[in-house]
Structures are given as structure tokens and as C-alpha cells.
Image (spheres, grey):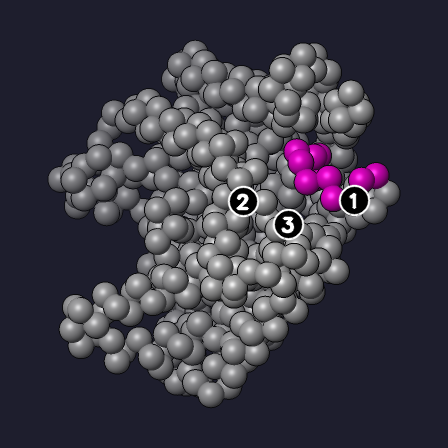
């Protein structure tokens, strides 16, 4: 009974689904979240069929998308959803009142500070360790959208065309959004609960019914012989993604309690278990934590696709692609053979944001600055900072190993296969080792885990980064690419302008 009361008290949203929470033995806030996402999925189909751009005006589509989004937010988070409006309103005022020369800096500072204040309050005032659906999750996505929009307005209205990269030219905004367009972009029902973030130009083009107008369609013309006029249906892709999402949810609910993460720092487990068994258990326990992210992000992608948002042109065989705002590629994650490939396919839109806002623009130490911004954006738990600081070391070591060791295994297919197997195992263990503090949250348990491993990966990676230097030519080339994400440029950009400028 006490557990039920605590679950109910932790939820600030509607208590209408409390009976469902008791039957399923799941926290009420999580039940509210899943039900609202399912309602958003149904609303997305209705939105595409009955409020299609050919049947109604952009004003109506903006208004409906915003009102539905705010209703779902109120249902899930109660009055805490007002923070979404306050954060968006403050930054819109900055955009209007300050000049385009510096508004992007002010918006980044204010949006990130407001998010951090809410995260610190939630963690240290209300409930430390409440690792559930909370109101700061949507605020993280809104922060990405606010800052992305500010930088894109700065690119379009304050910088010269010749100073922009091809990707920045595509996303640059040439006029100030109206208040309705701004709130629709930040708070629409398709992405307010779980994102993913997207560019403002992509969203406005979707609302107005011409999703590819600002992107180069030459590739589509070559692939299809002529530009297709009919709008492709997302139904097959939506069904596939929804099925994938609920399969991942079923896997998570089935195995998450079989391999509890906390056992990695249990004294008896550390003292009495052989080290190789600890390594295997670390991999299995961290593997079981990923399906919940697969569920949330894949379902969110399906919702956007069901509304008609996310079309990304055609493949070479003429089949439509619905991956414009996809947030992950599951198979590429699970079979990644390098730290970089893993991060290329994990939380893709956040990596896009980090690159566009920080990595491309930071004049000094962009890798370290990007990891630090990522840690600040994620929240106030000390474990987040331990994870991202460890990630810097792992990234530098992985880059050095790839540049110095990999060429020796490319002489034959059999050697390459051996290399892939070894690097797959090393990558999975390195990822688990790195993100353990992210899951444990606190400093004490995180240091206890690293101590049980004798800080072996930290020491080994520092040595590798020092002993195996990256060649200067390759280092210069890599500086043009985000270590978090290789494919962060928009799909149609050429990704070469920055190298030429350098």
C-alpha cells in the first residue's frame, strides 16, 4: 500500500489512470506517458487525414498541434507543464527584444539555465533518484528546439551566405517566427512528450505541406528519373515502428529484473565472482537497460511519421524513407564495432543538436566542450558528468586505435573479420563501463564500480591516447566531424565545405 501511495505521490499529472497503474504495478506517471503517446499516435493519423495541408490552412494545423500538445503535457505533468510555456515565452521575448547578432548566445544561456534550475530543483529538493517520467524530460527537447532555432535565425539573418556551411544554408531561417509558429514548433503533440527534436524549417515545411522544399532534391531525381508528385504513405513504416517499439517494451519488462544493474556494485558479487563473469554480467545488465529507450524513441518516431512528418526522400530503389528525425538505429547499435559507430546511431537528433550548436562553433577544444554541454543538458546527477568525462578519454583512445591499428587488419577479409569481432566486444564493454555512472547517478556507487575494475579502462585509454598519436592530417580531417555523430549533417548536405575552408 505504501508503494502504491508513493507511486501516486510521485506523479503530478492526472490520476484518472490510477486503477491501470495498480493493475499493471507500474508507476502512474509512466502509465500516463504511454497512454498519452498512444493517444498522440491516433491523433497523428487523424491530423494527417482530416487536417491535411490540402484541406485546411497552416494556422489551423499550428493551432490544433499546439493545443493537443499542451493538453497531453497537462495530463502527464499537471501544473509543471507551465514550465514549458515559461521557458518558451522567456526565450521568445529575448529573440524579439535583442538583436540577431547575439540572441543565439542569450537564448542558449537562458534556456539551459532554466532547464538546469528545474533539474536541480527536482533532483535535490523533491526526489533524488526519481528515475521516471518527469517534466524535465520534455524541457530537454524544448531546450534543444529553442537553441537550434536561435542559432538558425542568427545564421539566416546575421551571417553572410558565403560564411555558412551547406548544412547551415539549408537550415538557416530568413524571418522571425510568429508566436503561434514558435509555440507550435516547441509544444506540438507529436513531440512534446518524447521528441525527437527537429529543425524549424523541416517542421514548418511539414505544416505547410511541402516537406522537401528547402532541401536539395537532385538525388531523388537521379534515383527516380523524375521527381515524384504523389505524397508517399507512411502507414507501413508506422506499423513496423510501432511493432518494434512494443517488442522492445516487452523485452524490457521481461528481463530488466533478471539482471539488476545494482548487482555490479554488490560487495558479495565483487568479492566472490571471477572477473570474467563480472564482465559478462556488466554487458548483460546494461544490455537490458536499452530497450526502454528503444521503445520511447521508436514510438515517438512512429507518431511523427503517422502525422506525415519525417519523410526524407527516396532510396536508390525508389522506396520512400521516413528517417528524417529518427533517433536511433537499433541493429547498428547492438553490432557496433567502434565507440564512434555506437554513438553515430544512438540519440541521433541530440547529436545533431550538439554538433550544430557547439561542436561546429566552438573555437577551442570542441570535443571536450561538446561532452560538457551534453552533461549539463542531461541533468544535475553527478553520474552524468562522470560518464561524459570518461567518454572524452574513451573517444580519444578509440580514435587513436582506429587510425594506428585498423589499417593492419585490412589486408584480407579474414583479418578484417577477426578485427571486427574483437572491436565489437571491446566496444560493448567500453560503452557499458562508460555509462555505468549514468545509470547509478551518484558519485559513491560510480566510484565504487570503477574501483572494482581498478580504473582499468581509464588508465588504458590514457596510455593508448598518448602512445598511439593520431597523424596530423587525419586529426585535421576528424576535427570537421563530430566525435559523437558521423552522420550529423542533414542527409542532403555535402559535408565538405568546412574541410575546404579549413
Specify the principal SS of the magenta part: loop
Task: Tell me whether the residue at label 3 lies in contact with that at label 2, contact meaning CB atoms closer than 8 angstroms.
Answer: no
Q: Distance between the Cα atoms at labels 3 and 2?
A: 9 Å
Label 3: which secondary element: helix
> Is residue 330 within the magenta segment?
no
Label 2: which secondary element: loop
Q: Which residue is mark 2?
A: 259
Out of 215 and 32, give the one closest to the viewer. 32
Q: Position of residue 489 (x, y in %)?
A: 41, 55
Up-down: is 7 above or below 332? above
On the question of residue 47 being in view, the answer is: no
Residue 262 is marked as: 3
Please state which of residues 146 and 189 is positioned toward the viewer in this rendering: 189
- Closer-to-camera residue (179/30): 30
Residue with the most extreme front position: 272
Q: Residue at x 76, y 26 (%)?
A: 3
The quarter of the displayed image where residue 104 is located: bottom right
Residue 191 disc label: none
- Residue that carries the numbered disc 1 in the rendered image: 128
Q: Nearer the viewer, mark 1 or mark 3?
A: 3
440 displayed left or right of 110 = left
Magenta stretch in the rendered image: 126-136
Label 1 neighbourhood size at 10 Å, few (<14), some (14-19), many (20+)?
A: some
Number of the front mark, 2 or 1: 2
Judged left or right of residue 429, residue 67 is right
Label 2 crowding class (10 Å Cα cut-off): few <14, some 14-19, many 20+? some
Residue 127 position within the rendered picture, expressed as x and y whole percent measured from the top left: 80, 40
Q: Is residue 298 above or below residue 33?
A: below
Amino acid at each position: 500500500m505504501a508503494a502504491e501511495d508513493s507511486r501516486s505521490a510521485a506523479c503530478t499529472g492526472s490520476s484518472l489512470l490510477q486503477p491501470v497503474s495498480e493493475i499493471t504495478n507500474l508507476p502512474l506517471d509512466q502509465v500516463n506517458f504511454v497512454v498519452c503517446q498512444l493517444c498522440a499516435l491516433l491523433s497523428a493519423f487523424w491530423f494527417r487525414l482530416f487536417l491535411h495541408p490540402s484541406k485546411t490552412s497552416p494556422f489551423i494545423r499550428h493551432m490544433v498541434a499546439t493545443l493537443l500538445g499542451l493538453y497531453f503535457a497537462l495530463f502527464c505533468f499537471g501544473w509543471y507543464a507551465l514550465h514549458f510555456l515559461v521557458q518558451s515565452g522567456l526565450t521568445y521575448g529575448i529573440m524579439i527584444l535583442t538583436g540577431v547578432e547575439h540572441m543565439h548566445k542569450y537564448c542558449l544561456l537562458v534556456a539551459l539555465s532554466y532547464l538546469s534550475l528545474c533539474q536541480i530543483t527536482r533532483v535535490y529538493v523533491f526526489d533524488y533518484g526519481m528515475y521516471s517520467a518527469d517534466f524535465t524530460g520534455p524541457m530537454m527537447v524544448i531546450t534543444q528546439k529553442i537553441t537550434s532555432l536561435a542559432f538558425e535565425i542568427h545564421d539566416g539573418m546575421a551571417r553572410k551566405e558565403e560564411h555558412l556551411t551547406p548544412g547551415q544554408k539549408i537550415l538557416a531561417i530568413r524571418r522571425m517566427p510568429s508566436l503561434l509558429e514558435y509555440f507550435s514548433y516547441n509544444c506540438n503533440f507529436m513531440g512534446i512528450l518524447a521528441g525527437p527534436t527537429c529543425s524549424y524549417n523541416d517542421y514548418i515545411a511539414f505544416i505547410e505541406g511541402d516537406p522537401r522544399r528547402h532541401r536539395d532534391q537532385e538525388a531523388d531525381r537521379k534515383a527516380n528519373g523524375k521527381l515524384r508528385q504523389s505524397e508517399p504513405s507512411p502507414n507501413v513504416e508506422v506499423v513496423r515502428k510501432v511493432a518494434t517499439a512494443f517488442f522492445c517494451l516487452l523485452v524490457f519488462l521481461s528481463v530488466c529484473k533478471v539482471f539488476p544493474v545494482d548487482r555490479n556494485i554488490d560487495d558479495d558479487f565483487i568479492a566472490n565472482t571471477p572477473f570474467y563473469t563480472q564482465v559478462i554480467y556488466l554487458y548483460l545488465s546494461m544490455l537490458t537497460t536499452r530497450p526502454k529507450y528503444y521503445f520511447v524513441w521508436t514510438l515517438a518516431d512512429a507518431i511523427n511519421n503517422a502525422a506525415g512528418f519525417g519523410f526524407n526522400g527516396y532510396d536508390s530503389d525508389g522506396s520512400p524513407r521516413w528517417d528524417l528525425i529518427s533517433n536511433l538505429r537499433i541493429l547498428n547499435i547492438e553490432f557496433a564495432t567502434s565507440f564512434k559507430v555506437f554513438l553515430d546511431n544512438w540519440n541521433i537528433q541530440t547529436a545533431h543538436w550538439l554538433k550544430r550548436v557547439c561542436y561546429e562553433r566552438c573555437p577551442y577544444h570542441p570535443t571536450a566542450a561538446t561532452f560538457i554541454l551534453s552533461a549539463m543538458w542531461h541533468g544535475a546527477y553527478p553520474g552524468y558528468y562522470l560518464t561524459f568525462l570518461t567518454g572524452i578519454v574513451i573517444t580519444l583512445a578509440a580514435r587513436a586505435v582506429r587510425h594506428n591499428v585498423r589499417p593492419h587488419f585490412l589486408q584480407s577479409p579474414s583479418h578484417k573479420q577477426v578485427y571486427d569481432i574483437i572491436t565489437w566486444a571491446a566496444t560493448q564493454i567500453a560503452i557499458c563501463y562508460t555509462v555505468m555512472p549514468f545509470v547509478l547517478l551518484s558519485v559513491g556507487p560510480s566510484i565504487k564500480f570503477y574501483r572494482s575494475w581498478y580504473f582499468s579502462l581509464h588508465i588504458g585509454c590514457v596510455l593508448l591516447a598518448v602512445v598511439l598519436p593520431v597523424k596530423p592530417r587525419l586529426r585535421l580531417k576528424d576535427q570537421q566531424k563530430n566525435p559523437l555523430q558521423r552522420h550529423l549533417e542533414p542527409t542532403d548536405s555535402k559535408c565538405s565545405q568546412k574541410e575546404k575552408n579549413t
